[in-house]
Image (cartoon, rainbow, N blue to C red):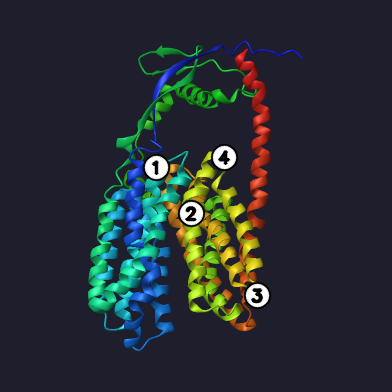
Amino acid sequence: MTTTINPLMSPHKTKKVIKLVPPDGGWGWMVILGTALSNIFNVSMLSLFSLVYGDALEAMGHKTQGAAVVLSSMLFVSNFGGPVAGAIVKITSPRFTAVMGACFCTVGIFFSGFSTNIWHLVTTYGVLLGIGLDCISNSTFVSINSYFKQRKSQAVGLANVGTNIGQMLMPHVVRYLLENYGFRGTCLLLSALSFNGVAGCLLLQPVKIHMKKIIEEVTVDETIYSLENEQFHMVVVERPDLNQELPKCNKQQTEMQLVNRSKINVSKESTDKLETTSPNKNDSFEEGKESNWLRKLYDLFGIVLLSDIRFINIVIGTALTTTSIANFSLVYPLFLQNAASLDKQQTANCMSAVAAADMVGRLTLPVLQDKFKIKARWMLIMTAIWVIVIRQILAHQTDVTLLLALSILYGFGRSMTVVTKNITISENCKSELVPAAVGLGMLSMGIIAPPLGYFLGWIRDYTGSYIACIAAQNALLVILLVTWLPDMLYLHIKSNKEKKTLDPIKVFTKM
C-alpha cells in the first residue's frame, strides 16, 4: 500500500521552549500539611457533636430531635453554600477562602459555648461552622488540585488522613476537657484549637510562585512566513483542502491559520462600518452592560457546566455514593448492637477497625491509583462494587470475629469514596472551572442527601429490618453503576478508536 503525500504539507522541525507546569510536589507537600492541620482541628468537629453538645441539649430540654435539627442546619448550610464558596475562591484565592473558613469555624465554636437554647446552637454551630467547613473543603481541594497532576489522588488521600487523626484523638481531648473545664470551658478551648487551622490554611500559597520550568519540544511548520504591511502584522499560511484529514499535531495550528486568514479578508469598507456609531448608542451601552453583568455571574458560578450531561451524571453519582456511605455509618453501630447482639466494647472495636482501615486505605490506594494511572471515576466504580459485596455479606453475619474482619475490608474500600469524590468532578472540567464544579457537587449533595436519608430511615422503621435498609443503601450504588458504566465503556471504546487512527499518522511523521 502506497502513501500519498500532500505537496502542500511541508516537513516539520522541532523547537525547544520553556513551559511552566505544576510542581507535582515541592511546596505542594506543605499545602497537604496545612490541609491536614485544618482537617484535624475543624473538619473533625463533625464527629464530636454528640460528645460535646449532648448534655447541653438535654439541659435545654432537647434530645435526639434537637440534635438532628442542629446537625441538619449545619449540613444544609455547608452543602448549599458550595457554589458561593466556589465563587469566593475564584474571585479571591484558595488561601484567603480557607483562612476565612477557619475563622468562621473558630467564631462558631467559641460562641456556641454561650448557647442557652437550641436556636443559639443553630446559629453558631449550624450556620457559622457550616459556612466555615464549606469554605475550607472547597478551597483546600482547589489548592491541592492546582499543585498536583500526576499524584493528585495520593495528595488528597494524605490530606484527608488529618480527618482520621482528628477523629481518633479529639474524642479523648474533648472527654478530658469536659471533665475538667465543663461545657463552656471546653467550647472556648476547642475554639482555640480550631484557630490553629488558620496557621495550616496560610500554607496554601498560590501555585504560580511555585511553578516548575520544563523544556519541551514543539513542532514548527516551515510553511509559515511573516507578512507585514501598513494595516496588519500577522502570520499567513497556505493551507491544504479543508476536507483533507490533518495530523492531530497540526489541529490547533490549523485553527489559528484560519483565523488569521479571515482577518486578512476584512476589507476597508467593513472597517469603516465598524467605526460608525449607532443612533441608539446609550441604549446599546446599557444593554451591553447588563449582558456583561449576567455573563460574569454565569461564569462565576460555572453555570455552563450544567449544560454538560456527563457532568450532571457525575455529580449525581458522587452524591448518591456519599449518601449511601454516610447513611451506613449512621446505621452500622445500631446494626451491630441490635441485629448482631454485640456489646458496646465489641461495637467500638468494629468501628475502630473501620476507621483504622480507612486511614490505611487513604495512604495506600491512591499510590496504586497514581502508579497504574487509573481514572478517579473508574476507581469510584471499583470501590462501589467492593462496598456492595462487603456490605451485603456483612448484613447477614452475627459472629464478632467475622464482623471485625468484614469491618476492616469495608473501611479499606470506603476510603476511596472520600479521596476520589472531588477528583472525579475535577477530572471532567477545565481547571478554571474546578471551584465552581466542586461547589455544584456540594449543592447536589445538599439536594439529594436529605430526602434519600429520610427514605432510607423510613425503610428501616417500616420493615424493622437492618438487612432491608442495607440493601436499599446498596441500591444507590447500583444506580451509580448503571448510569456510569455505559458512559465509561463508551469513552474507553472511543479512546481506543482514536489511538488506532493516530498510529498511521505517527508512523508517517517519523518517515
Q: Which residue occupies 33% across, 75% down?
A: 52
Q: Earlier in the sequence, mark 4 or mark 3?
A: 4
Is residue 506 toward the left or the right of residue 264 in the image?
right
Q: Are marks 1 and 3 in contact (CB under 8 Å)?
A: no
Gap in angstroms between the C-alphas marked 1 and 2: 25 Å
Q: Estimate the x, y position of residue 269 in percent, counting from the top left.
A: 42, 24
Report the residue marked by disc 3.
Answer: 468
Secondary-structure class at tag 4: loop
**Type of residue at label 2?**
Val
What's the residue at 50%, 22% (across, down)? 257
Q: What's the distance in space between the residues labelled 1 and 3, CA to CA?
A: 43 Å
For disc 1, the marked residue is: 146
Residue nearer the viewer, 192 or 441 = 192
> Residue 210, how many percent across, how many down?
32, 36
Name which residue type carries label 1: Ser
- Say whether disc 1 or disc 3 marks the residue closer to the N-terminus: 1
**Which residue is the site of mark 2?**
360
For the N terminus, give its image quadrant.
top right
Kindly report the distance in space between the C-alpha atoms of the residues bearing marks 4 and 2.
19 Å
Query: In front: mark 2 or mark 3?
Result: 2
Q: CA distance from mark 4 to mark 3?
A: 37 Å
Mark positioned earlier in the residue sequence (4 or 1)? 1
Cα separation, mark 2 vs mark 3, equals 30 Å
Q: Earlier in the sequence, mark 4 or mark 2?
A: 2
SS state under label 3: helix
Q: Give me the disc on residue 372.
A: 4
Q: Is residue 171 left or right of residue 251?
A: left
Of the residues tagged 4 and 2, which is closer to the observer? 2
Give how far apart the Cα atoms at labels 4 and 1 are.
21 Å
Question: Are the residues tagged 4 and 3 within 8 Å (C-beta)?
Answer: no
Earlier residue among tags 1 and 2: 1
